[in-house]
């Protein structure tokens, strides 16, 4: 689907093609009429129309000696709905490593033993580190504050800050003031 999306945008990346679409949105035109309106050669307009027809945006019908082109509004609506659906857009990034940023931050901030060199001050980097740390807690298991601190101590001596940030970023939840802690799902 991403090849189709790229082809669609390539066709629309030309200013003259966008003008042709704009004109055809108002009414059908022949190649000669479009050429005169856009101050282009008829062969250039034909080339643009063939590209637009290839992705299903325009269609032609014969009227006496001329081919008259029109915008296929229904096809445009269907194509835009399918190309820009959440599923289609998600598929266009299926080969992207969504953990690449986290992995880079972890590589920069974590020592060989797994502990932190420092707690990042930058929010995005801190969030990546917290996602790394929260993996030490089992989903569904309840922990006392002492147990949480013991686990966090392996990462950094400032367990209070890490604990507070895990709660703040909603990666962990807590019951009451210092009661039980658990990992959010």
Image (cartoon, rainbow, N blue to C red):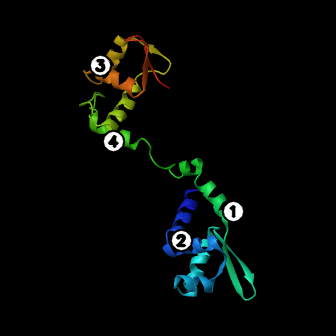
Q: Secondary structure at mark 1?
A: helix
Quote the CA–CA distance across marks 3 and 2.
57 Å
- For the residues labelled 4 and 3, the Cα–Cα distance comes to 25 Å
59 or 19: which is nearer to us? 19
Q: Is residue 47 above or below residue 22?
A: below
Q: Residue at point 59% right, 74% down?
A: 23
Q: Tell me if label 2 and label 1 are in contact, CB under 8 Å.
A: no
**Mark 2 = which residue?**
18
- Which badge, 2 or 4, is on the more N-terminal residue? 2
- What residue is shown with label 1? 74
Quarter location, residue 67? bottom right
Q: Nearer the viewer, residue 132 or 162?
A: 162
Q: Which numbered disc flags the more N-terminal residue, 1 or 3?
A: 1
**Label whose residue precedes the other's in the sequence (4 or 3):** 4
Residue at position x 61%, y 58% from top?
A: 80
Sequence-wise, the earlier of marks 2 and 1 is 2
Classed neighbour count for the residue bearing mark 2: other residues with Cα under 10 Å, few (<14), some (14–19), many (≥20): some
Most foreground residue, 41 or 108: 41
Marks 2 and 4 sit apart, C-alpha to C-alpha, by 41 Å
Q: Earlier in the sequence, mark 1 or mark 4?
A: 1
Q: Foreground: 111 or 178?
A: 178
Circle 2 sits in a helix, a strand or a loop, which is it?
helix
Where is mark 3, residue-wise?
Answer: 160
Whether tag 3 and tag 2 are in contact, CB under 8 A, the answer is no
For disc 4, the marked residue is 104
Query: Residue at position x 27%, y 24% from top?
Result: 156
């Amino acid at each position: 689907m991403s090849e189709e999306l790229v082809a669609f945008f390539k066709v629309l990346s030309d200013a003259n093609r966008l003008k042709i679409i704009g004109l055809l949105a108002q009414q059908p035109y022949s190649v000669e009429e479009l050429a005169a309106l856009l101050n282009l050669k008829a062969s250039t307009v034909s080339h643009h129309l063939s590209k637009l027809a290839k992705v299903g945006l325009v269609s032609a019908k014969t009227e006496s000696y001329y081919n008259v082109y029109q915008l296929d509004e229904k096809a445009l609506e269907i194509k835009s709905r399918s190309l820009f659906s959440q599923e289609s857009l998600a598929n266009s990034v299926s080969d992207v490593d969504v953990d690449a940023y986290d992995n880079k931050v972890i590589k920069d901030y974590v020592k060989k033993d797994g502990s932190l060199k420092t707690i990042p001050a930058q929010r995005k980097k801190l969030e990546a580190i917290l996602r790394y740390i929260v993996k030490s807690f089992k989903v569904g298991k309840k922990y006392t504050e002492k147990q949480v601190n013991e686990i966090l101590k392996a990462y950094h001596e400032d367990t209070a800050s890490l604990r507070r940030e895990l709660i703040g970023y909603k990666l962990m939840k807590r019951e009451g003031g210092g009661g039980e802690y658990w990992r959010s799902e």
